[in-house]
Image: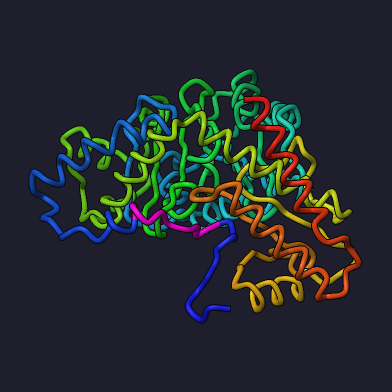
Amino acid sequence: MLQDQTILRIPGPTSIPPSVQRAMNQTMIGHRGKETSQLLKNITPGLKRVFGTEQEVAIIAGSGTAGLETAVVNVVKPGDEVLVIVTGAFGDRFTKICQAYNVKTHVLNVEWGKALDPEEVKAYLVEHPQVNVVFSTYCETSTGVLNPIDLLAKAIREVSQALVVVDGVSCVGGVETKMDEWGIDVMVTGSQKAFMLPAGLTFVAASERAYSVMEENKQPRFYLDLKKYKDNLLKDTTPFTPALSLLFGLEQVLYLLEEEGLENVYARHALLKKMTRAAFEAINIPLLTTEEDASPTVTAVQPKEFDAEEFRKILKQEFAISIAGGQQHLTGKIFRIGHMGYCSPADVLQIISAVEITLKKIGKNIELGKATAAAQKVYLAEEENK
């Protein structure tokens, strides 16, 4: 193993394309100068296309959690009641943020590994008409679930005027996102996942409905005041010092996404999911989620006959490949493979081959090459159907 080699196959941070790394190494410029205004002008249209919105997409220097807190402090008014749909560890983060602001928080827990049921949420809102905001997660990173937020928003609209707020941190940029068409009021994502950047930026877009609520909201906020970001973006600037090196990289990321074509980006992620799932199914290692609920950006594997942590340890020792473990009550019970952003079918074939060797080393009786062949067949079938 090369001493300075690390192959990231965790669900964030993800690998950074070389051209993006080069872009981030550009000479620093003044953040209030014409060059930065032009940079923002270049970035804005691409961000809107990825979000599927005509609204301004705020670019905030901070982690994805800062974006989640931005959503809470801007659209939750003092005295409001909110509903948080928890499908895993990151859905629960909305709960913790709301409780930190002493918001009366209803929690709808969904079994980890399963997607939310829009009809169940709809029924809950009928019983709790006082709920003003519904928080949900698009991709639940801790379980590898992709929630049907389009159907969720539709169901909510049928029975409630509650705002729909979505954490899309681990999938926006890797899966189709139509914020305006679907009726999402606030969408949040981060830079270190499908956006192929280091951590440090969070992106937040809000609907006109959401901005109307913000106008009346007396909740104190300063750095995370979304209206400030919108007003400044309309003038091609930012309310506070931007993370310029990351913006250089973001410009290049958006160029790469446009060059590949967003539909092709989404198709690639779907293919990576199918290849990964087929590989583990071929060697009879259980997956945490069903095909219908599975995310195109991360796959959760739930081994029954070997220790997930030992497997992760040997994989990293032998091949410098880092994959993620489980969280909370799934710690030690699952491992998660990220296949988002700067990731190709060749990368999936690499990791599956290494996985097979690692399984042999920890004593799992498998036929070498069977999982890799299954992934190869998925790839070839996809190519034939083009």
Residue 29 in picture, x, y percent from top left: 12, 56
Residue 350 in picture, x, y percent from top left: 64, 58
Write down the region rendered in magenta: 12-20
Q: Nearer the viewer, residue 253 or 161?
A: 253
Residue 82 showing in the rendered view: no
Q: Is residue 212 magenta?
A: no
The picture quadrant where one finds residue 110 is top right
Residue found at x 40% / y 41%? 204
**Figure quadrant of the N terminus:** bottom right
Figure label count:
0
Q: Is residue 282 left or right of residue 295?
A: right
The picture quadrant where one finds residue 383 is top right
56 relative to 82, above or below? above
Residue 368 showing in the rendered view: yes
Q: Is residue 171 left or right of residue 254?
A: right
How would you classify the magenta stretch by its main secondary structure? Answer: loop
Residue found at x 79% / y 53%? 371
